[in-house]
Amino acid sequence: MTGWLGLFAASKPVISPAGPRDAAAIAAIHARSFHRGWSEQEIEQILMERTTVADRAVEGRKLVGFILSRVAADEAEILSVAVDVRRRNKGLARGLLQAHLGRLAAHGVKAVFLEADESNAPAQRLYARAGFTKAGQRAGYYGGADGRRATALVLRRDLV
Ligand SMILES: CC(C)(COP(=O)(O)OP(=O)(O)OC[C@H]1O[C@@H](n2cnc3c(N)ncnc32)[C@H](O)[C@@H]1OP(=O)(O)O)[C@@H](O)C(=O)NCCC(=O)NCCS
């Protein structure tokens, strides 16, 4: 098929820095991705902070994924990453994480940390493939919808 419809269908996600104006779209994906979603106001607040580094993936005109970190001195913590349920398992998070680590390095970050549920296979695989290794664990860190507590693995990757 030719014409603009064909071009639109073929559009690839574009990764770029996110800002406060993306708060509503990020909150919508966050709410569908986590047991406890963050409100649009909470996300807007995070995006306005000078210590936040945020990236988004946009397909056509739709935000389909994001990643947020907080930087303190030469370390960063990834606060959240999520991809629209209909766009998962297509390498989008891998691309977002790669671009994000590059931006963190440009901010002078030397070590990146995060917590991820040990039973979250896509997340564990995403980070293992990006070179993150286990730095510790927190038993009972997450509370699920079923009331059970899950263990968080603390993961680390050095950027130097
Ligand atoms: C985790 C998440 C961001 C991954 O996004 P994605 O765009 O689907 O990930 P990718 O397509 O880049 O795949 C990353 C890796 O996970 C693997 N993966 C993807 N979906 C998977 C699944 N359902 N089960 C097992 N592995 C899976 C991919 O094969 C890939 O590994 P590979 O490079 O070895 O092939 C997405 O599943 C999500 O939004 N989940 C809900 C929010 C969440 O849990 N965030 C992480 C909190 S720490």
Image: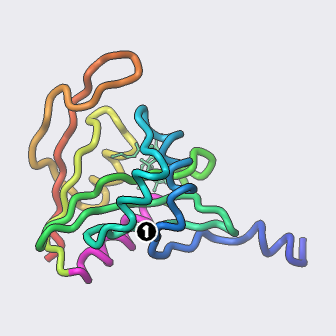
Judged left or right of residue 27, residue 98 is left
Q: Is residue 122 above or below residue 67?
A: above
Q: Is residue 67 above or below residue 4?
A: above
**Mark 1 lies on residue:** 55
Judged left or right of residue 112, residue 146 is right
Q: Which residue is more in the foreground, 50 or 29?
A: 50
Question: Is residue 102 within the magenta segment?
Answer: yes
Residue 118 quadrant? top left
**What residue sits 23% from the left and 46% below the top?**
115
Helix, strand or loop at label 1? It is: strand
Residue 141 quadrant? top left
Measured as percent of width and height from the top left, residue 18 is found at 46, 70
Magenta span: 93-107
How many numbered discs, if any? 1
Q: Amino acid at mark 1?
A: Asp
**What residue sits 17% from the left and 46% below the top?**
154
Measured as percent of width and height from the top left, residue 1 is found at 90, 71
Q: Which residue is more in the foreground, 129 or 98?
A: 98
